[in-house]
Image: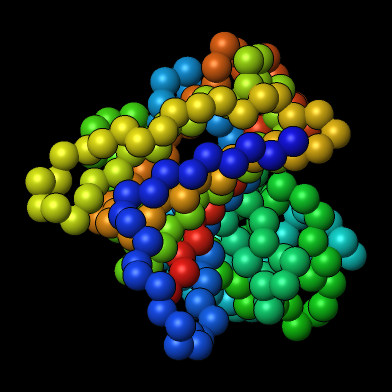
């Protein structure tokens, strides 16, 4: 069951009867399939996308991704928790769960890169912390919506979230706009969508487990997405 929370920081503009072009929507992962292990609010933001060196492949459909021999070592700067997109990116987004070497990693689910020529890829690093300056993200201009998705996990008491913003007023003081809880997932993915409006200068999203995190094995390992959608 999805919950909808709406916060509007600005009044809607006056009605205009002229036909307007459709709004352009851009989605960006603040964090993807995040493995949560914090009893205190931890704030994450994923850095810019970077092109990986070399080319990579799998044997059949596999969670083990390796380098194409004779090219640059692709995973020299890749770490556990990084978000990777292989090839064209359609259906190939994965998160690194283990790094054996600069030429071999394990990702969160199998991907089919079974081609001797291999595939190019991009990667992005998440940066997380519990301090007052951690996790702040400056969005581009437009109407902002944040979606928090609890894909899987076994968090006792569910997932707590905290959203803070700074406005364009110039004061720069952090304002806590919403806290809430997403119940533990069952057969369906649970999530929350929050409309932030257009006056947000920067924001951050905190995550923590409500009571306990009993296990990180298999389906008990948390996968949490925080996605920013901007309409211009």
Picture quarter with the N terminus: top right
Residue 48 picture quarter = bottom left
Residue 83 picture quarter = bottom right
User: Closer to the camera, 1 or 226?
Assistant: 1
Residue visible at 66% across and 33% down in the picture:
222
* Left or right of 94, for residue 75: left
Residue 138: give x, y in percent of width and height: 30, 58
Residue visible at 27% across and 31% down in the picture:
131
Coloring scheme used: rainbow
Query: How many numbered marks, from 0 up?
Result: 0
Residue farthest along the left direction in this orientation: 171
On screen, residue 73 above or below 130: below
Residue farthest along the top direction in this orientation: 211
Residue visible at 77% across and 50% down in the picture:
109
Residue 133 picture quarter = top left
* Left or right of 119, for residue 63: right
**Residue 224 visible here:** no
**Residue 97 visible here:** yes
On screen, residue 21 above or below 50: below
Residue 171: give x, y in percent of width and height: 10, 46
User: Closer to the camera, 163 or 50?
Assistant: 163
On screen, residue 75 above or below 1: below
User: Closer to the camera, 165 or 105?
Assistant: 165
Residue 93: give x, y in percent of width and height: 67, 61
Picture quarter with the C terminus: bottom left
Residue visible at 63% across and 15% down in the picture:
157
On screen, residue 197 above or below 150: below
Residue 176: give x, y in percent of width and height: 31, 33
User: Closer to the camera, 126 or 144?
Assistant: 144
């Amino acid at each position: 069951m999805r919950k909808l929370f709406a916060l509007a920081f600005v009044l809607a503009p006056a009605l205009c009867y002229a036909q307007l072009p459709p709004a352009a929507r851009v989605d960006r992962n603040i964090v993807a399939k995040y493995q949560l292990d914090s009893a205190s609010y931890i704030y994450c933001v994923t850095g810019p996308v970077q092109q990986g060196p070399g080319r990579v492949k799998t044997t059949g459909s596999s969670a083990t991704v390796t380098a194409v021999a004779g090219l640059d070592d692709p995973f020299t700067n890749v770490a556990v928790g990084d978000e990777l997109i292989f090839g064209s990116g359609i259906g190939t987004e994965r998160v690194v769960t283990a790094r054996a070497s600069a030429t071999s990693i394990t990702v969160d689910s199998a991907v089919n890169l079974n081609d001797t020529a291999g595939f190019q890829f991009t990667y992005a690093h998440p940066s997380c912390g519990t301090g007052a300056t951690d996790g702040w993200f400056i969005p581009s201009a437009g109407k902002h919506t944040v979606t928090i998705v609890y894909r899987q996990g076994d968090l006792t008491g569910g997932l707590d979230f905290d959203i803070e913003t700074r406005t364009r007023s110039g004061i720069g003081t952090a304002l806590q706009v919403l806290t809430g809880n997403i119940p533990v997932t069952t057969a369906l993915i649970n999530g929350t969508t929050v409309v932030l409006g257009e006056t947000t200068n920067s924001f951050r999203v905190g995550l923590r487990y409500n009571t306990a995190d009993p296990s990180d094995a298999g389906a008990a390992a948390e996968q949490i997405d925080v996605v920013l959608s901007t309409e211009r």
